[in-house]
Image (cartoon, rainbow, N blue to C red):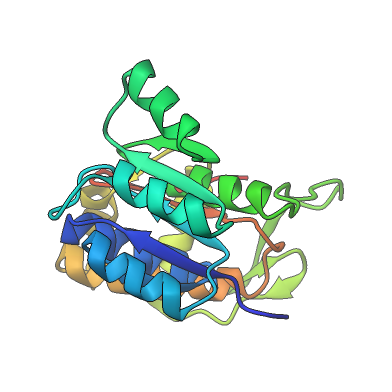
Amino acid sequence: MLSIKILVVEDEQETAQFMCEYLQDCNFTVDYAETITDALFLIRKNNYDILLLDLHLSDSTGFELLRKVKSTHRIPTIVVSGEQETTVKIHAFKLGADDYVVKPVDMEELVARIWVLLGKPTRIDLASGQPLFQTKLDKILYKDKILDLTKTERDILLILIENKNITVSRESITNALNNITSHRSLDYHIKNLRKKLSQVEEKGATLLRTEYGVGYKLQY
């Protein structure tokens, strides 16, 4: 299967890093640009399937990039912005935006919107009567498949399973697990756990959801 290529245009580095890492964990190929100049260079060089565009950039506005891109390319574009005004959204759509997502970004929703633009299914088929996750001895199974987890990853997943569909704060997780001493350490284990779940979950689905700045949620 060909990799889906995404260009993230965002001048706020922390937000860009968060978005890029999440999308990469979802098996997308991701490039990143901080400016219109860099974005146009990458667009001329590569064939992107999706453009994620912030409206406030250091060298101009996202509107200007949107205008230039849509005049020469047919890249499906999602504006990702903190601007909530209806007039701003309408202007973006008039310039050719295909979708508009307001910050702070719900990455699970953003990924679902990406799949919709690509014409791909997003639903997780849970028609089976079996529980999605099961525990047997010291193993966790997903749809009868044993997950190859470290002890720390297993402990984190158990906490999330017990609180499914509820956001669990990073503090709650680190306080519950003696071997995790910092948020950086937790983020490392979450990243690895998300990769392992992505290997077994349905295409287009993201079970492990990040609530930016708050914590994590297992949604199914």
Which residue in the rendered view is the most extreme toward the front? Answer: 71
Would residue 50 be found to the left or right of residue 126 on screen?
A: left
The answer to which quarter of the image holds residue 74 is bottom right
Residue 2: image location, x then y, percent? 68, 80
Seen from the viewer's position, the closer of residues 99 and 143 is: 99
Which residue in the rendered view is the most extreme toward the top? Answer: 86
Asked whether residue 220 appears in the rendered view, the answer is yes
Number of labels in the image equals 0
The answer to which quarter of the image holds residue 106 is top left
Would residue 10 be found to the left or right of residue 126 on screen?
A: left
Would residue 128 be found to the left or right of residue 168 on screen?
A: right
The C terminus - image quarter: top right
Name the residue at 32% across, 41% down.
63
Residue 198: image location, x then y, percent? 59, 69
Name the residue at 59% across, 47% down.
112
Q: Is residue 106 above or below residue 65?
A: above
Name the residue at 26% across, 60% down.
36
The answer to which quarter of the image holds residue 56 is top left
The N terminus - image quarter: bottom right
Name the residue at 67% across, 71% down.
200
Residue 212: image location, x then y, percent? 29, 47
Q: Is residue 184 above or below residue 46?
A: above
Asked whether residue 154 appears in the rendered view, the answer is no
Residue 65: image location, x then y, percent? 34, 52
